[in-house]
Image (tube, rainbow, N blue to C red):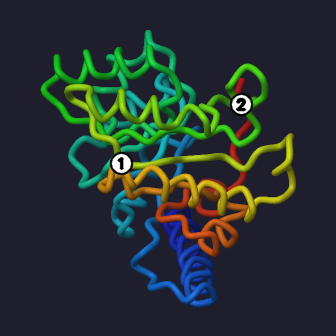
Amino acid sequence: MTDRRTELAGNLAKVEERIAAACAAAGRPRDEVTLIVVTKTYPASDVRILSELGVRQVGENRDQDAAPKAAACADLPLEWHFIGQLQTNKVRSVVGYADFVQSIDRDRLVTALSREAVRAGREVGCLLQVALDAGASGRGERGGVAPAGIEELAGLVADAPGLRLDGLMTVAPLTGEYAGREQAAFERLVDLSTDLRRAHPAATMVSAGMSADLEQAVAAGATHVRVGSAVLGVRPRLG
């Protein structure tokens, strides 16, 4: 355990240095960017070590992994972000532990989340996942709503009991006009955030950037970066 703590502490320090350097290069205060450590596939023991090291925001993308982990870490001062594509049959479980759902991309999900949040007596922060590779279907390869659908979906979230509209999230697309142009993709997300805040001033979160492209996200204006492997190491292959 001591060796793992040393490893995580070292990795966390390197990521912190990268974020601080990216903020300095962009002329931004360091406290404008929040680190979310994505702990998917890693055990609750790692989450506990990260908490001891000062991490307060953790991310998960599979409910079957996240729910027992969150329960095992319920005594820790953490906020949990659900960042994966979410099926409506998992909503009740996710609402039980998630403080934020970053993958809102369709009406049915908003309805289901609202119903379960009210039932649980909770308020869940919501980010719309924006698909910058959305085709004719209006959805992206990895989920998300097309930019043209943001206004309508945001209105639904803002009006839904138990939900709070907090902002936008994206994943750098692998196809389409932004493929291989991470910073341009994140700048587009920031522009869309500016548009969103005209109608919803409190929706200030811009979640973008991961281990490989956090610098581009910070340069573009992201408020939250989601870093997994750079902190926890290369992930075990899922069965």
Q: Position of residue 86 (x, y in %)?
A: 51, 23
Kindly state the secondary structure of the residue where label 2 is placed: loop
Kindly state the secondary structure of the residue where label 1 is placed: helix
Residue where numbered disc 2 is placed? 140
Q: Position of residue 237 (x, y in %)?
A: 74, 35
Q: Position of residue 176 (x, y in %)?
A: 86, 41
Tell me whether circle 2 and circle 1 mark residues in contact (CB < 8 Å). Answer: no
Mark 2 vs mark 1: which is more N-terminal?
2
Image height of 233 relative to 137, above or below? below
From the viewer's perspective, tell me whether residue 59 is left or right of residue 183: left
Kind of residue at disc 1: Ala
From the viewer's perspective, tell me whether residue 50 is left or right of residue 131: left
Residue visible at 21% across and 29% down in the picture: 162
Residue visible at 61% across and 35% down in the picture: 148
Quarter of the rendering containing residue 156: top left
Crowdedness of circle 1 by 10 Å Cα count: few (<14), some, many (20+)? few
Q: Nearer the viewer, mark 2 or mark 1?
A: 1
Quarter of the rendering containing residue 228: bottom right
